[in-house]
Image (spheres, rainbow, N blue to C red):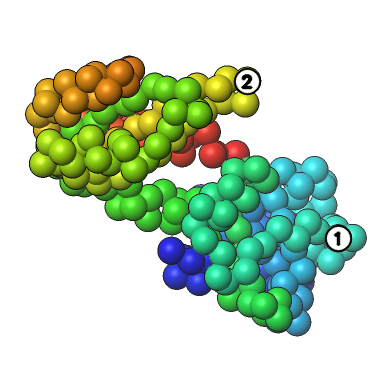
């Protein structure tokens, strides 16, 4: 999914003539802590709640409150994974989207991405969750998929977690079967380490918990 397909219909941009008071009112209304700012139709930057609160005179407009604003943005063809990385690294609740000629197209909110990911990660599909642990050099998605499919099952979604100070990986699989006994036995025959397995109702709640943990990590 690309940035242009993820634009919010609810969050409008501010104008450079808007006051600090209006900024805070809109942020409260839209439940965000960042908003894009336009000047004569051009994107000039992103204003944050914390930056506005640093100023005492909230009756002043943005032109007088700030000499310049940070300009984080992505282009309209940017993939959702790159958008997630940018928002996480810069701790943004809203990320502007521009065309190749830097025409403002709209913005993406963290809440909009969470909604998309809830479908993207197959949270609503019935099945079980399996967590494998392995050395990074041993990771092979092709082999993992082959093992799952040899048991007449399918991988609905997967994601990898790792840390910079470790060579170990955790691979979380959402599988379209709630009874994972046969799949687990096959993985064990291939000497995979099964860290966790969640079946039936436990599978749905665990994947949702992990998804929410990821979103909390991304929050600002």
Figure label count: 2
Query: Which mark's residue is nearer the viewer, 2 or 1?
Result: 2
Reading the image, the residue beneath label 2 is 165
Q: Percent position (x, y) of residue 4?
A: 50, 71
Q: Percent position (x, y) of residue 215?
A: 46, 39
Q: Who is closer to the viewer here, 132 or 29?
A: 132
Reading the image, the residue beneath label 1 is 68
Q: Percent position (x, y) of residue 167?
A: 55, 22
Where disc 2 sits, the SS reads loop
Q: Who is closer to the viewer here, 104 or 4?
A: 4
Using the image, tell me which numbered label, if any, was put on residue 148. Answer: none
Please report contact status of discs 2 and 1: CB closer than 8 Å, yes or no.
no
Q: Is residue 164 left or right of residue 3?
A: right
Q: Residue at x 75, y 82 (%)?
A: 40
Marks 2 and 1 sit apart, C-alpha to C-alpha, by 38 Å
Residue 127 shows in this picture: no
Q: Residue at x 32, y 37 (%)?
A: 143
Rendered view: 169 above or below 18 = above
Q: Percent position (x, y) of residue 182?
A: 11, 26
Q: Is residue 150 left or right of residue 13?
A: left
Earlier in the chain: of badge 2 and badge 1, it is 1
- Assign the N terminus to one quadrant of the image: bottom left
Q: Residue at x 52, y 33 (%)?
A: 217
């Amino acid at each position: 999914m690309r940035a242009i397909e993820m634009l919010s219909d609810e969050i409008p941009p501010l104008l450079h003539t808007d006051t600090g008071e209006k900024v805070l009112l809109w942020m409260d209304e839209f439940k965000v802590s960042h908003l894009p700012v336009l000047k004569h139709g051009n994107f000039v930057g992103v204003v944050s709640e914390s930056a506005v609160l640093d100023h005492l005179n909230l009756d002043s407009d943005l032109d007088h409150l700030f000499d310049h604003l940070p300009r984080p943005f992505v282009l309209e063809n940017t993939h959702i994974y790159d958008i997630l990385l940018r928002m996480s690294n810069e701790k943004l609740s809203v990320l502007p989207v521009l065309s190749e000629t830097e025409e403002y197209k709209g913005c993406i909110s963290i809440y909009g991405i969470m909604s998309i990911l809830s479908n993207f990660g197959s949270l609503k599909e019935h099945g079980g969750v399996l967590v494998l642990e392995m050395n990074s050099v041993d990771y092979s998605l092709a082999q993992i998929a082959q093992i799952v499919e040899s048991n007449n099952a399918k991988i609905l979604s997967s994601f990898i977690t790792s840390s910079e100070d470790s060579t170990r990986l955790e691979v979380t699989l959402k599988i379209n079967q709630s009874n994972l006994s046969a799949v687990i036995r096959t993985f064990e025959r291939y000497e995979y380490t099964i860290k966790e397995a969640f079946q039936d109702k436990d599978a749905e709640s665990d994947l949702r918990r992990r998804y929410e943990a990821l979103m909390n990590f991304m929050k600002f």
